[in-house]
């Protein structure tokens, strides 16, 4: 057992980074991420973390600095939110295309305009095509565990891709919860020394980012896709190892609650999954056979894992906290595309977009939406598949 303390999600991330023993941290402040790098700077100042903090002039430079240091062999970390993530977007692609392990925390915040500091998932899911492994936490403990595991996954030789760890700003980032911090020596032995596919240290000429022929570029992109597929097994393996060492195992890419005998499955990602679980408990008490499935890793997308759980379900409700304008919620879109590989007959499905721009969605809202869906399904009055943007007003 480790040390149990009350930490905000942001500080939980910072303490996980501390245990990973990075060499370089590059930082630029942005609400609601700032307290992560402030805590890391404090730990460095106290001598509790032996890392170099690079204070840069922008988020673009923060990831660029991490990239340069990582290419030279350093274990690196940075964090950002919203507009900062958009500003560093060029280097988000650079890092993955170069196959360099880097870990970055995304403390989600609505993308402006208009100016908004409250959370939804729009900044995080906006990166889904960038070639990063992407995980998302439900609480402070999971934010800690996912961050620590991110270094292990990123530096696995069959992966060698950067990893993003997402958590909602304020809801998780600034809310204190009990967090168990494992023994530093055990973590160090488990994590091991930094691994990466190549190092540029000036000892021999080496070009990075030069012009390649189309066929060579295509091969490099194909290898990223292969690495993403490899990451599925690595994530599960790391989760198993972590569970044996530290007593917390989450189930790999997804986590399921009351799904074994469920005829109806609600799918979500992030902090509001806790409210969804409360709604499921209430519905279960009333005899509704419903379960909650939570996506822990958005990339690689766990379509096969989800299908194995929901294949016998009568109905599925997908809750998205972001919207692909002109289409549907991103999770719903990915699910329907993924399911098409396994079946030509989908169960009844609904895509509910809600909680945009930080609008508060609570267990009673989930309860009402799911109860209505199930009642209509059982009575035969439900449209086969439908989309709804739920506007909660209090």
Image (spheres, grey):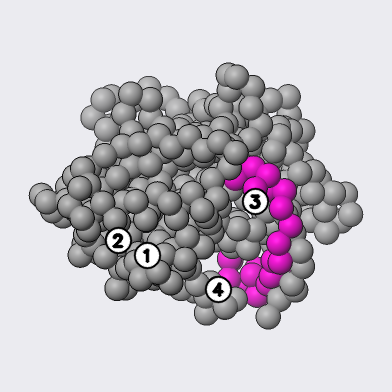
Q: Earlier in the sequence, mark 2 or mark 1?
A: 2
* Dot 2 alpha-carbon crowd within 10 angstroms: few under 14, some 14 to 19, many 20 or more: many
From which residue to which does the magenta span run? 168-194
In percent of width and height, residue 64 lies at: 60, 31
Q: Nearer the viewer, mark 1 or mark 4?
A: 1
Q: Position of residue 239 (x, y in %)?
A: 47, 68
Percent position (x, y) of residue 226?
Answer: 30, 49
Check contact, mark 3 vs mark 4: CB within 8 A: no
Task: Tell which residue pokes out farthest to the right in this image.
Answer: 46
The answer to whether residue 147 is left or right of residue 279 is: right
Q: Secondary structure at mark 3?
A: loop
Answer whether labels 4 and 2 touch (C-beta < 8 Å).
Answer: no
Q: Quadrant of residue 182?
A: bottom right
Which mark is in front, 3 or 4? 3
Check whether the beta carbons of the residues at disc 2 and disc 1 lie within 8 A of each other. yes
Residue at the image point whose x is 22% and y is 58% from the top: 378
Q: Which residue is mark 1?
A: 291
Give me the disc on residue 172. Answer: 3
Q: CA distance from mark 3 to mark 4?
A: 19 Å
- Which mark's residue is nearer the viewer, 4 or 2? 2
| Front of the two marks 3 and 1 | 1
Mark sitting earlier along the chain (3/1):
3
The residue where tag 2 is placed is 264
The disc placed on residue 248 is 4
- The C terminus - image quarter: top right
Q: Position of residue 67 (x, y in %)?
A: 58, 37
Give the CA distance from mark 2 to mark 1: 6 Å
Whether 208 is drawn above or below 252: the answer is: above
How busy is the neighbourhood of tag 4: few (under 14 within 10 Å), some, or many (20 plus)?
A: some
């Amino acid at each position: 057992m480790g040390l149990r303390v009350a930490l905000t999600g942001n500080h939980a991330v910072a303490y996980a980074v501390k245990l990973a023993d990075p060499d370089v941290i590059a930082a630029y402040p942005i609400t609601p991420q700032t307290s992560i790098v402030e805590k890391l700077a404090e730990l460095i100042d106290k001598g509790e973390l032996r890392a170099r903090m690079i204070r840069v002039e922008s988020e673009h430079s923060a990831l660029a600095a991490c990239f340069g240091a990582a290419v030279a062999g350093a274990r690196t970390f940075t964090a950002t939110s919203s507009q900062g993530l958009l500003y560093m977007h060029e280097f988000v692609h650079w890092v993955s295309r170069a196959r360099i392990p880097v870990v970055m925390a995304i403390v989600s915040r609505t993308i402006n305009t208009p100016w908004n500091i409250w959370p939804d998932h729009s900044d995080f899911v906006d990166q889904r095509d960038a070639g990063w492994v992407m995980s998302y936490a439900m609480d402070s403990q999971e934010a800690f565990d996912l961050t620590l595991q991110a270094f292990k996954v990123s530096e696995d030789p069959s992966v060698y891709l950067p990893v993003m760890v997402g958590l909602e700003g304020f809801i998780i980032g600034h809310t204190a919860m009990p967090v168990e911090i494992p023994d530093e020596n055990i973590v160090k032995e488990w994590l091991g020394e930094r691994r990466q596919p190549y190092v540029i240290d000036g000892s021999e000429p080496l070009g990075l980012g030069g012009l390649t022929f189309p066929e060579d570029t295509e091969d490099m992109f194909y290898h990223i896709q292969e690495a993403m597929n490899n990451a599925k097994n690595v994530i599960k393996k790391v989760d198993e190892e972590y569970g044996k060492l530290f007593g917390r195992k989450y189930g790999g890419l997804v986590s399921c609650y009351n799904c074994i005998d469920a005829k109806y499955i609600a799918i979500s990602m992030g902090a509001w999954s806790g409210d969804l679980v409360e709604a499921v408990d209430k519905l279960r008490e009333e005899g509704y056979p419903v379960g909650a499935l939570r996506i822990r890793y958005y990339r690689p997308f766990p379509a096969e894992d989800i299908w194995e759980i929901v294949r016998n379900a009568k109905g599925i409700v997908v809750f998205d906290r972001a919207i692909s304008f002109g289409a549907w919620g991103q999770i719903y879109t990915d699910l329907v595309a993924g399911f098409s590989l396994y079946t030509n007959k989908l169960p009844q499905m609904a895509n509910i977009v809600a909680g945009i721009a930080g609008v508060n969605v609570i267990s009673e809202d989930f309860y009402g939406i799911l109860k209505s869906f199930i009642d209509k399904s059982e009575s035969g009055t439900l449209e086969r598949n439908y989309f709804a943007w739920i506007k909660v007003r209090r």
